[in-house]
Every structure is written in structure tokens, then in C-alpha cells.
Image: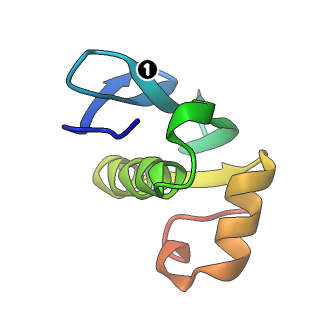
Amino acid sequence: MTVMQNQFVHEPGRLFLENDAHQVVGEILYTEHVDTKVWDVTHTFVDPDFRGQGIAAQLLDALAELARQENVKLKPLCVYVKTAFMRESKYDDVKTH
């Protein structure tokens, strides 16, 4: 299976990607801390049928862009985001520990 048209949908605490059939193919979850302007990124998931297509990276990139727009930092609590933050300097401006 492939994702024909990627559409990001943002809800408070959740950014997900759905295909043209409105099937959720992946999501990244976070908890907002308004007082500290930090979002704890708690979970990243990609449907097994859609893995290996870079969807988790797309989700993290989209969340990082949203964090930049909202002027907040991302605290990685899930393994995927922790690893991406260690490997990729493109997240340096939005990551916190």
C-alpha cells in the first residue's frame, strides 16, 4: 500500500497523516505545557502497512514546523523522536531536554 495524497491533520495533542481514503497512516502525540512553552512528544506510530516510506520523519518534520510557528520547544519522550533529535541537527532549534 502507498499513501496517495498525504494530508496532515492537527488536533490539540495530536498530529496525524491520512491518505486519500481518510485512513490514518501515522500519528505523533504530544502533551502541551502552556506555562513552559514545551510540548512533550510522547508517541510516534505508523501503520505497519505504511512503514518504510518515511512517514514518521514527515510527521516529526511537520510537528517541528508547528513548534516553530507556535514558538515552543519539543521534549522527546518517545524513542523515535529521541533518536531523531540525536541524529539530525535540523531539530536543534526546537528540541529541549
> Which residue is denoted by mark 1 in the rendering?
12
Looking at the rendered structure, the number of numbered marks drawn on it comes to 1
Question: Which one is in front, 1 or 39?
Answer: 1
What crowding class fits label 1: few (fewer than 14 Cα within 10 Å), some (14-19), or many (20 or more)? few
Determine whether 58 is above or below 45 in the image. below
On screen, residue 89 versus residue 8, left or right, reads right
Q: Residue at x 49, y 25 (%)?
A: 14
**Image location (x, y in percent) of residue 6:** 25, 39
Report the residue at 59% width, 80% height from top.
88
What is the three-letter code of the residue carrying label 1?
Pro
Q: Secondary structure at mark 1?
A: loop
Describe residue 15's horizontal placement relative to residue 81 as left or right. left
Q: Nearer the viewer, residue 3 or 92?
A: 3
The x and y percentages for residue 40 are 67, 40
Tell me where residue 22 appears, x and y as whole percent. 28, 15
**Image position of 97 with respect to 25: above or below:** below
Of residues 95 and 60, the one nearer the viewer is 60
**Quadrant location of the N terminus?**
top left
The residue shown at (24%, 16%) is 21
Outermost residue to the front: 1
Q: How far from the left and from the top, in percent, is residue 18?
A: 33, 26
Looking at the picture, does residue 35 appear above or below residue 68? Answer: above
Q: Residue at x 50, y 32 (%)?
A: 26
Residue 89 can be seen, yes or no: yes
User: Foreground: 56 or 13?
Assistant: 56
